[in-house]
Amino acid sequence: MASRSARLSRQVLAVLLVGGLFVVAAWLLAWAMNPEESRGFTVRTEDEQVTASEPAAAEPGDPVTGAADAGTPAPTPTPTPTGPPPEELIAAAGPPSATTVQVLDAGGGGSRTSVAVEVLEDLGYNVVSVTSARARVTTTTVWFTEDYEAEAQAMRARENRVAEVAPNQGLSDGVNLHVLVGPDWDS
């Protein structure tokens, strides 16, 4: 009887183990197939394009960044108050070519994000990374790294589809501006 009980216990254990493996495999497959939770990003340099599956930690002066932290909720940006005319905002900022920019799909979709990249590059910005954001926004927002608020305001003055300006919310400080493209970006 003890032998039969031991065999039954081993069979139950084997069934539980196999079932657990199936659950883990299904979870991993669902996680890998969900593009909204992607950790991939693209870094573009002057003569090459590199795609990585995990974001690298930004070194001082390194413009490479990854997606926003999953545990960080998207902040509600505050609208920029009526202030100086666009010409003054643009004059107060450094040139677009000296400003590194990460463009993130934050709910706008891939086609809107691609258009945003083209527009920003046409304006002369140095787009160094294009990726998906875990944070979501309802209006296209530019998050600025410390000491780059003037550049963020100038971007907004140059491109009216950039609706909001807010301080960086946990993305790499190795990039000057992070443009979160929302569903309001029109082609």
Image (spheres, grey):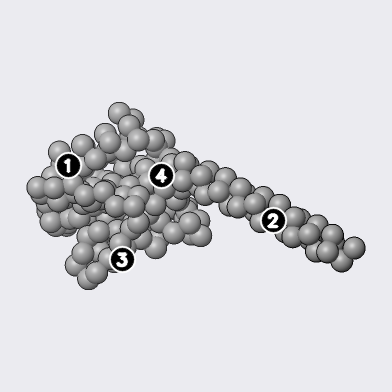
Q: Residue 127: horizontal and vertical position, in percent?
A: 20, 48
Q: Residue visible at 31% across and 43% down?
A: 162
Q: Quadrant of the C terminus?
A: top left
Q: Is residue 27 visible?
A: no
Q: Quadrant of the N terminus?
A: bottom right
Using residue 2 as the reference point, say whether residue 50 is left or right of it: left
Q: Which residue is mark 3?
A: 57
- Residue type, mark 1 in image: Glu
Q: Which residue is mark 2?
A: 14
Q: Report the label total.
A: 4
> How far, Cα to Cα, is label 3 from label 2?
41 Å
Q: Which mark is residue 106?
A: 4
Disc 4, SS: loop
Q: Is label 1 or label 3 in front? A: 3
- Residue type, mark 2 in image: Ala
Q: Which mark is residue 121?
A: 1
Q: Residue 133: horizontal and vertical position, in percent?
A: 40, 49
Disc 1, SS: helix
- Among numbered discs 1 and 4, the one appearing first in the sequence: 4
